[in-house]
Amino acid sequence: MLRRLYDWTLKMAASRHAIWALALVAFVESSLFPIPPDVMLIPMILAVRARAWRLAMVCTLASVAGGFAGYGIGYGFFETVGRPVLELYGYGHQFDEFAAAYNESGAWIVAFFGVTPFPYKVITITSGATELNPWVFGLASLGSRAVRFFLVAALLWYFGPPIRHFIERRLGLVTLLFCIALIGGFVLVGFVL
Protein backbone atom coordinates (compact mmCIF):
# COMPACT_ATOMS: atom_id res chain seq x y z
CA MET A 1 0.00 0.00 0.00
CA LEU A 2 2.86 2.38 0.87
CA ARG A 3 4.44 1.73 -2.54
CA ARG A 4 1.15 2.50 -4.35
CA LEU A 5 0.79 5.75 -2.38
CA TYR A 6 4.37 6.73 -3.23
CA ASP A 7 3.86 5.96 -6.94
CA TRP A 8 0.57 7.90 -6.94
CA THR A 9 2.30 10.89 -5.29
CA LEU A 10 5.05 10.87 -7.93
CA LYS A 11 2.46 10.69 -10.70
CA MET A 12 0.46 13.55 -9.18
CA ALA A 13 3.67 15.54 -8.64
CA ALA A 14 4.21 15.63 -12.39
CA SER A 15 0.65 16.79 -13.15
CA ARG A 16 -0.10 20.33 -14.28
CA HIS A 17 -2.16 21.10 -11.14
CA ALA A 18 0.48 19.91 -8.67
CA ILE A 19 2.02 23.35 -8.14
CA TRP A 20 -1.32 24.72 -6.89
CA ALA A 21 -1.68 21.78 -4.52
CA LEU A 22 1.86 22.40 -3.24
CA ALA A 23 1.07 26.07 -2.64
CA LEU A 24 -2.11 25.16 -0.77
CA VAL A 25 -0.35 22.58 1.44
CA ALA A 26 2.52 25.01 2.19
CA PHE A 27 0.03 27.76 3.07
CA VAL A 28 -2.18 25.64 5.32
CA GLU A 29 0.77 23.90 7.02
CA SER A 30 2.01 27.24 8.34
CA SER A 31 -1.16 27.87 10.28
CA LEU A 32 -3.25 24.71 10.75
CA PHE A 33 -2.23 21.51 8.96
CA PRO A 34 0.20 19.10 10.68
CA ILE A 35 1.89 17.64 7.57
CA PRO A 36 4.84 19.66 6.18
CA PRO A 37 4.92 20.60 2.48
CA ASP A 38 8.08 18.52 2.03
CA VAL A 39 5.76 15.54 1.55
CA MET A 40 4.77 17.11 -1.78
CA LEU A 41 7.87 19.15 -2.54
CA ILE A 42 10.26 16.18 -2.52
CA PRO A 43 8.33 13.96 -4.97
CA MET A 44 7.57 16.96 -7.17
CA ILE A 45 11.26 17.78 -7.51
CA LEU A 46 12.16 14.12 -8.00
CA ALA A 47 9.51 13.87 -10.73
CA VAL A 48 10.78 16.95 -12.64
CA ARG A 49 14.15 18.14 -11.33
CA ALA A 50 14.27 21.07 -13.75
CA ARG A 51 11.45 22.73 -11.74
CA ALA A 52 13.30 22.52 -8.39
CA TRP A 53 13.92 26.26 -7.98
CA ARG A 54 10.43 27.28 -9.07
CA LEU A 55 8.87 24.75 -6.69
CA ALA A 56 11.07 25.95 -3.81
CA MET A 57 9.99 29.54 -4.51
CA VAL A 58 6.28 28.63 -4.60
CA CYS A 59 6.67 26.64 -1.39
CA THR A 60 8.53 29.51 0.31
CA LEU A 61 6.07 32.24 -0.66
CA ALA A 62 3.00 30.15 0.15
CA SER A 63 4.49 29.13 3.49
CA VAL A 64 5.23 32.74 4.46
CA ALA A 65 1.72 33.81 3.41
CA GLY A 66 0.32 30.96 5.51
CA GLY A 67 2.59 32.09 8.32
CA PHE A 68 0.82 35.45 8.31
CA ALA A 69 -2.51 33.58 8.53
CA GLY A 70 -1.14 31.77 11.60
CA TYR A 71 0.06 35.10 12.98
CA GLY A 72 -3.48 36.43 12.49
CA ILE A 73 -4.93 33.46 14.37
CA GLY A 74 -2.60 34.11 17.31
CA TYR A 75 -3.20 37.84 17.23
CA GLY A 76 -6.95 37.77 16.74
CA PHE A 77 -8.03 34.89 18.90
CA PHE A 78 -5.58 35.15 21.76
CA GLU A 79 -7.15 38.32 23.14
CA THR A 80 -10.70 36.97 22.83
CA VAL A 81 -10.09 33.39 23.99
CA GLY A 82 -6.57 32.80 25.30
CA ARG A 83 -6.04 35.79 27.58
CA PRO A 84 -9.36 35.47 29.47
CA VAL A 85 -8.58 31.82 30.19
CA LEU A 86 -5.07 32.67 31.42
CA GLU A 87 -6.42 35.47 33.61
CA LEU A 88 -9.11 33.18 35.02
CA TYR A 89 -6.35 30.93 36.32
CA GLY A 90 -4.10 33.80 37.38
CA TYR A 91 -1.49 33.39 34.64
CA GLY A 92 -2.05 36.64 32.75
CA HIS A 93 1.07 38.22 34.28
CA GLN A 94 3.20 35.19 33.37
CA PHE A 95 2.10 35.36 29.74
CA ASP A 96 3.08 39.03 29.60
CA GLU A 97 6.57 38.09 30.83
CA PHE A 98 6.74 35.27 28.26
CA ALA A 99 5.63 37.65 25.48
CA ALA A 100 8.32 40.18 26.42
CA ALA A 101 11.00 37.46 26.42
CA TYR A 102 9.71 36.01 23.15
CA ASN A 103 9.70 39.40 21.42
CA GLU A 104 13.21 40.13 22.66
CA SER A 105 14.52 37.13 20.69
CA GLY A 106 11.61 36.76 18.27
CA ALA A 107 13.55 37.21 15.05
CA TRP A 108 16.01 34.49 16.06
CA ILE A 109 13.25 32.17 17.25
CA VAL A 110 11.34 32.49 13.97
CA ALA A 111 14.52 32.17 11.90
CA PHE A 112 15.74 29.08 13.75
CA PHE A 113 12.47 27.17 13.96
CA GLY A 114 11.48 28.12 10.42
CA VAL A 115 14.31 25.93 9.12
CA THR A 116 13.81 22.96 11.46
CA PRO A 117 11.15 20.23 11.34
CA PHE A 118 9.55 21.86 14.41
CA PRO A 119 5.86 22.56 13.62
CA TYR A 120 6.06 26.03 12.09
CA LYS A 121 2.43 26.80 12.93
CA VAL A 122 3.38 26.92 16.62
CA ILE A 123 5.84 29.72 15.87
CA THR A 124 3.44 31.64 13.63
CA ILE A 125 0.55 31.52 16.11
CA THR A 126 2.83 32.32 19.07
CA SER A 127 4.29 35.27 17.15
CA GLY A 128 0.79 36.67 16.67
CA ALA A 129 -0.26 36.03 20.26
CA THR A 130 2.84 37.81 21.59
CA GLU A 131 2.40 40.59 19.00
CA LEU A 132 5.89 40.17 17.57
CA ASN A 133 6.59 43.00 15.14
CA PRO A 134 5.02 41.82 11.84
CA TRP A 135 7.99 43.11 9.79
CA VAL A 136 10.41 41.18 11.95
CA PHE A 137 8.19 38.12 11.72
CA GLY A 138 7.83 38.44 7.93
CA LEU A 139 11.53 38.92 7.21
CA ALA A 140 12.62 36.14 9.56
CA SER A 141 9.98 33.84 8.07
CA LEU A 142 10.97 34.62 4.50
CA GLY A 143 14.65 34.02 5.20
CA SER A 144 14.21 30.81 7.18
CA ARG A 145 11.59 29.24 4.93
CA ALA A 146 13.67 30.08 1.84
CA VAL A 147 16.72 28.43 3.42
CA ARG A 148 14.72 25.34 4.24
CA PHE A 149 12.97 24.84 0.91
CA PHE A 150 15.84 25.94 -1.33
CA LEU A 151 18.21 23.65 0.56
CA VAL A 152 15.86 20.72 -0.04
CA ALA A 153 15.58 21.75 -3.70
CA ALA A 154 19.36 22.07 -4.09
CA LEU A 155 20.02 18.66 -2.57
CA LEU A 156 17.36 16.99 -4.70
CA TRP A 157 18.43 18.82 -7.86
CA TYR A 158 22.06 17.84 -7.38
CA PHE A 159 21.65 14.34 -5.91
CA GLY A 160 18.23 13.54 -7.41
CA PRO A 161 18.66 10.08 -8.93
CA PRO A 162 20.58 8.55 -5.99
CA ILE A 163 18.10 10.05 -3.50
CA ARG A 164 15.16 8.79 -5.51
CA HIS A 165 16.77 5.34 -5.69
CA PHE A 166 17.38 5.39 -1.91
CA ILE A 167 13.78 6.41 -1.18
CA GLU A 168 12.35 3.78 -3.51
CA ARG A 169 14.54 1.00 -2.08
CA ARG A 170 13.95 1.97 1.55
CA LEU A 171 10.47 3.49 1.41
CA GLY A 172 9.40 1.92 4.70
CA LEU A 173 12.46 3.25 6.53
CA VAL A 174 12.10 6.72 5.01
CA THR A 175 8.43 6.82 6.00
CA LEU A 176 9.26 5.70 9.53
CA LEU A 177 11.99 8.34 9.90
CA PHE A 178 9.62 11.02 8.58
CA CYS A 179 6.94 10.00 11.11
CA ILE A 180 9.48 10.02 13.94
CA ALA A 181 10.64 13.52 12.95
CA LEU A 182 7.03 14.74 12.72
CA ILE A 183 6.03 13.29 16.08
CA GLY A 184 9.32 14.48 17.59
CA GLY A 185 8.47 18.02 16.49
CA PHE A 186 5.15 17.87 18.32
CA VAL A 187 6.81 16.38 21.42
CA LEU A 188 9.32 19.21 21.32
CA VAL A 189 6.40 21.64 21.33
CA GLY A 190 5.35 20.17 24.68
CA PHE A 191 8.79 20.82 26.16
CA VAL A 192 9.22 24.32 24.70
CA LEU A 193 5.78 25.59 25.62
Image (cartoon, rainbow, N blue to C red):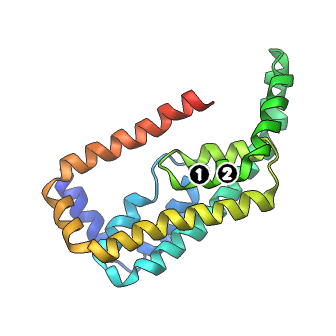
- Which residue position holds label 2? 108
- Residue 34 screen position, x and y as percent: 49, 46
Q: Which residue is drawn at 41% across and 42% down?
A: 182
Which structural element holds mark 1? Answer: helix
Side (left or right) of 42 relative to 79: left
Q: Residue at x 81, y 24 (%)?
A: 94
Residue 9 seen in the figure: yes
Q: Residue at x 40, y 82 (%)?
A: 51
Tell which of 122 and 191 is nearer to you: 191
Side (left or right) of 142 relative to 94: left
Residue 13 seen in the figure: no
> What amino acid is found at the position of numbered circle 2 in the picture?
Trp
Q: In which quarter of the image is residue 52?
A: bottom left
Q: Which residue is drawn at 27% across and 48% down?
A: 175
- Residue 22 screen position, x and y as percent: 47, 67
Mark seen at residue 126: none
Residue positioned most to the bottom: 50
Question: Is the Cβ of the residue at disc 2 closer than 8 Å to that at disc 1?
Answer: yes
Side (left or right) of 139 relative to 156: right
Which structural element holds mark 2? Answer: helix
Residue neighbourhood size for the residue with mark 2, other residues' Cα within 10 Å, grouped as few (<14), some (14–19), many (≥20): some
- Which residue position holds label 1? 112
- Residue 110 screen position, x and y as percent: 65, 51
> What amino acid is found at the position of numbered circle 1 in the picture?
Phe
Task: Measure the alpha-carbon separation of dots 2 and 1.
Answer: 6 Å
